[in-house]
Structures are given as structure tokens and as C-alpha cells.
Image: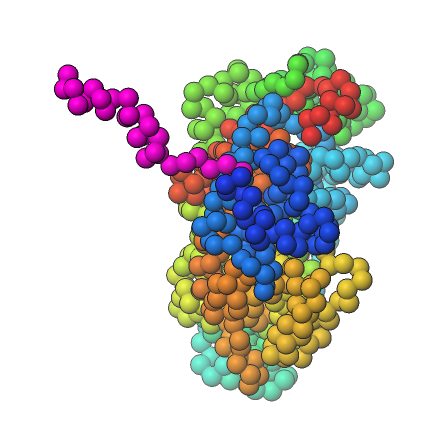
Amino acid sequence: MNPRAALLIPLVPALFALAAPQQATYETAVTPVLRRNCSVCHNDTTLAGGLSMDRFTGAASIAGNREVWERIVAKLRSGEMPPKGAPRPAGAEVQELVRWVGQEFDRLDRARPPDPGRVVARRLTRAEYANTVRDLLGVRFRAGEEFPVDDAILGFDNIGEVLSVSPFLMEKYVYAAERIAQLAIGADPLPKATLVEHKPDAVRRVDSGATESSDQLDYSGEYVFRVWVRGHLGPKGEPVQLRLSVDGKEVRTAEIATRENETSTVARDVQRAKEEARVYLTAGPHTFRAELVGEEFRKPVPRAAARRPGGAPDNSMYPDKFDLLGPFAAKGEHPPRTRILTCDPAAGPACIERILAPLARLAYRRPVTKSEVAQLADVARKATQAGFTPDQSVQFALQAMLVSPHFLLRVERDAKGQYGPVSDLELATRLSYFLWSSMPDEELLALAERGKLRGPGVLDAQVTRMLADRRSEALAQNFAGQWLEIRSLASVKPDVLKFPMWNAALQEDMATETRMFFDHILRENRPISEFLSADYTFLNARLARHYGIEGVDGPEFRRVKVDPAQRGGILTHGSVLTITSYPVRTSPVLRGKYILEVLLGAAPPPPPADVPRLEEDVVAAPASLRVALERHRADPTCASCHVRMDPLGFGLENYDAIGRYRTEEGKAPIQVGGRLPNGVEFSTPRELKALLERDLPDFARNLAEKMMIYALGRGLEPYDRLPIREIAGKMEQSEYRFQALIRGVVHSLPFQARRGQLKNVTDVAGKR
């Protein structure tokens, strides 16, 4: 060996040590920022905000003050702290502190013993009940109207702690079981056919040439759906087509003759024609629609005229009222009866058991014992002895099945030991009610019964199959409807004098746009960033007109490319913009709070009780509103929340209280945008969305938390932090594709496992 090289060998480790970056510590990454920028106000003497940093002298302070440190990190990241006028740390220093504390959070969470938590036994929600009845028996039951509203906590109505069964609800279940069994089997004699008139004041004007009405039928059978047409068409006098449909399915199209232009009120009120269709309808809710074909009949109808046919533009022809005559005995068999009665109940007890056994297996979401089937069959036997027909006896057995705790409740057994995996059957039920809000189907249940659900690739294959199934629309209805708060759109009442174009049809269109948008991102596995800034949405002609978008014709919704300077992402959906407004004007505060709370999971605290409320809803003009909010932020107590919330809300001021794009209100130009606490400024909705995209990790984490709460039916605990971060990490690795979130939740420890029965309360406290 070269002598000179031999002399250098002992120096190599020291040279590498000098070259390697020094590993950060609490003392190097955290302490300098606290001393220089935080302890000036947050010390034992001043106690600003009730917080002293003097006691935070080492890494051990993070473990003992986890929630405090999470708030500190959030305030530093957003730029809310230090406050305006106080010395601010350099951006690199903040990044290093946040990175180091985040690593310490991760270390602490990984040191915690695994704990999947426990989900309490709970009943089916109204949506789950209706969907399960639909998939089990083929019956559409309006549980949302028949049962009390489900209590909602943590943003969702499927949280087990509040899903109990009261005596009042049990009475409702008993009555519902009787009605559902009658709808499914249809064994009761049909009453004499009657005529039900849907008069003009009972129908809903959808467009100038379309009307709708709904009805709840008590019996399955054939009905005559009759429509009356009134008015005249206009100067051409050419025939027009009238299309009749039930539940969105066309049942008849007829040609209606017209006359030359008649301008008198008398001519308008003359009934020109009536058309009818004879259709088979199952018992339950149905929507009837009559529409004149052609774009000339697609003019919007103001809300004030939506129930008044005489308010049609140009005195044009329009469907006036509906008649429904029935029920009549149907020719041949119709579902769902043929789906359930796989043999003739009159053949005897063996046939009845063959009917009930597979139904009970699906209804109870597990294999059933012979004794359980015998108990149900015994109900049918006693009904037959009491003089009921064999078919009616099956109805009684179905009633018993539908009031069984095995149907109404979701119960899981505790694991043995500290924790363990839920059974395959319990996992199948968790999965189906997560993705479908309904029971497992035959394929999923069969895999669980054979213990194959956790086989290599099986669970992922089932997730793929179930997301492709139309039943996964339940995620858009129930998860997105609550996460994005779109359900509240039904209770919003914009002022009809200021917004005369608002009506129930436009309201439903807005809800449909958001549901279809969410469903598209889910099914197509799009990046979740498109929730914030997609350059497309889903529109029909009416909603496109409302938005001022041309080239969209007809009542059907379709994907439409939009101008990203004006539209794109859920924040520009009419549904979100309307629910975050007052009846007469927009609300920057409500909209800013929505962004923080719903999208970023950084909800501001409620205002202190001693702070006067800003009467934002009565401020006359945007300019005066901005001035009023600036005064509100001058109060230090208010500024801590409004300094971040208000600028975000003003970023959406280009949209009025029902979602129309605008550049001025009255003669005053709209002032959009503002300055965030971290000093970043923006001046258009597009720039606001770009800023939110920079917070995509926060958006992903918040979405993962919301999805986990919904999937488990319980709130999150400290031991859930690590699974949430792991799911968010997998989303980042997949370029934030939406289905990576779904699969991450399904494969997570909280979803796959369950805590065992703890011995005492001390153990529970220790876990938390």
C-alpha cells in the first residue's frame, strides 16, 4: 500500500462526518424559533392565548402536549403566527421546524401499540335501510319519509354511538315491514280502481313545456297515466310531440295538433288534447313527467310561476294536469314477486322454507341456521292456519325477517386478546355498507362464507367490481352529500324577489351536478386535485343557461368543458355557492369557513360569547361588507379566525348567492381576492384555486379523515393518526388518485380489525 494512503486511512471517517449534514434536533430546529419568535408573547408572564412556551424545553414536551403542538404547527404553516407586526421567522426555519416536529409525531405514533378501535353495534341508517330493502326484495321504500331523521355527529349520520332503536322507531319498523312485505309479494286483493287527479297546482313546472308530479302507490298493478295539454304553440301551428315518462323511462310519445297563433287568455286556457299510457307500476314512489319535445319548450320558468301553468312564456302550449287511474290486475307476473317466490307457496312447508332460507341469508348477511329458517316458516304456518292464503303467509314471514335484530342491526364480535381481524363476513358487511350503503351481494357474501375474501388480490378485485357497480352511487349520495354539505341545499330558500329564476328544478340540477362530478372522479379514478380545479363539470341545458354557458341542449346531464377563468372545481358549483350564501346576498365569511372546514379540515373555533356578532346578512353592498369585515378583524379576538377566513371567502365574490358569475353588483365592481396571513395575495377565483392546490396534502389528509369516519361509523382517536398518514402517503404515491384513498381505507388496520374487550376503564383511558 502506498505509505501516503496508509496515513490518510484513519482520517476517512472524520472526513465523512464533516461532509455529512448534521442531523437536526429539538435544540437546533425548534428552540431558536420558539425563543426568537414565540416566547416574546407566549411566556409565563404574558400568557398570550393562555399559552406559555417557557415550559417547552425539549422533545419530551411534544409527547406531553400533542394537541398544543399540532395547533402550533398549523398556525406557523398558515402564517397566522406570529401575528402581524411581530418578528417572523424565515420560511426555511418554519419548514425545518414543521418537518422535525412532524417526524417526531410519526415516531411517537409508531411507538404506540397498534389499536384498531371498536365500533359499537348500531342500526341501519334510513339510507342503508332503503337500499338494503331494494337489493333484498326489489322494493323501493321511502325510508327518508317514513322514519325519523337520523342524528348526525362528526358530519355524518352513520355514526354508531347515536344509531340506537327507540320504541317509537320500533313501531315504525313494524309498520314498514308490513308495507314492504305487501309490496314485495302483492298477495293482498287489489281494491277497486280509483281516479287520482294531479291538478295544476299539484304538478311542478320544470320548463315552459314540461311538468312533473310524484305519487306514492299502495298497490302494484297496471295504471292509466293520462296527461292534459293546454294552450297554443305560436304562429306556425305545426304539430308537436308529447313525451310521457315514468321514473325517467319513456312510456309513450304522441303527436299533438295545434292551431294558428291565438293570443287571448281564453285560447290559452283551452285544453287542446289528452294523451294516456297504460303501464305496470310497482307499489311505492313514482315520478310522472310530460314534456313537449323541442328547444322552444325549454325556456326557464321563474319560481313564482313554477306551480302556475298560466305563467308559461308566450302563452305557449304546455302539459297542464295529470290523471292516474288504477290499480288494475296485471297480465302475467311482474317483479319483484317472481324474484322472491321461486316456487308456489301452496305446495307446502318445504317450498316456503326454500323461499325464506336464501332471503334470510342475504338479509342477515351471514349463513342462517335451520332453526332460524324454521322459526320464520312457523310464522307462515300460523298465518295459513288463521285463514290467510299461502302467498299472504309468506308476507307474514317476510315481516318477521324485516323486524329481526339480525336485519336491523350491524353487530360485530369482539376480538380475542388485545385486537384481531374482523371475520370475513364482518369485513364483507363493512365493505358493502361503505361502498354501497347496502348489504353484501351474492358474490361478496359467498367469498366471505368460504373465507376467501382476504386471499391474494381478492379484496382489491372486489373493490374494483363494487366501485364499477351503479350501487356505488351511494358514496356520492351519502358520503359526498354530507362531506360537501350538499344535503342542506334542499332547505336553502333564496329570496324569490331578488332571484326570481330560482326554483325546485334548478335546485335539483345543482345537486345533480355535484353528485355526478364526485361520482365521475370516483369511478374514473381521477386525481383528487380535480375537486379543486377541474376544467369540466356536468350540466344540462337549464343549469348551463343559469351559468351562462352556451352549446348545451336538452334535459340530460353530460360532461362539459368550462372556462377555467370562471368555472372549475366544486367551489364554483352552484350547490356550494348557494349553501354558503344568505337568502339575499353572498357571504365571504360562510364561504371562507367552508373552505377551511370542509376542504382543509382546519375549522375555526366558534366565536367567543362576548364578541358582538357581525350582521353580515344585512350589509347593503359588497364594498360596505368588505369595510365591515375589516373593522371586525381589527378586534384581536376576531382577527385570529377572520384574518384567514375572510380573504378566502372574498376570493369567490365573482359568484352571486345562487352561483351565477358576475363582475359587478349593481353598478359597483366586484372586488375579488385578498391577502393571506402568510403574505400571499390573489385576485381571481382561478388564483385562489391554485393556492388551494398548493395545500393538496392538507386536502388529502382531511379527505382521508372524513372517509375513514364514514367507513368506520365512528370518530377518530389518537391511535388512528398513523393509519391516516399512511393512507395519505399512499395517495401521494399514486399521484393522489381517488381510488387509492378507497383502497387505503379498506386495507387499513382500523377497517380490517377490531379491538378486544378491555378489562376496565383504565385500559380504555390508556389506549386514548
In the displayed image of the protein, which residue is found farthest to the right? 167
For the stretch drawn in magenta, what is the main secondary structure?
A: helix
Q: In this view of the protein, which residue sits in the foreground, 253 or 544?
A: 544
On the question of residue 91 being in view, the answer is yes
Residue 498 in which image quadrant: bottom right
Towards the viewer: 184 or 674: 674
Q: Is residue 667 above or below residue 589?
A: below
- Identify the image quadrant of residue 316: bottom right
Q: Position of residue 19 (x, y in %)?
A: 32, 35
In magenta, the rendered stretch is 1-26
**Does the magenta portion include 5?**
yes
Asked if residue 37 lies in the magenta stretch, the reply is no
In percent of the image, x 66 and y 49: which residue is there?
285
For the C terminus, which image quadrant? top right
| Residue in the image at 44% along x and 76% along y | 238
Q: Write the residue at 67% across / 69% down.
A: 634
**Of 99 and 218, which appears nearest the observer?**
99
Vertical side of 159 occupied by 350: above or below = above
Residue sitting nearer the eye, 565 or 58: 58
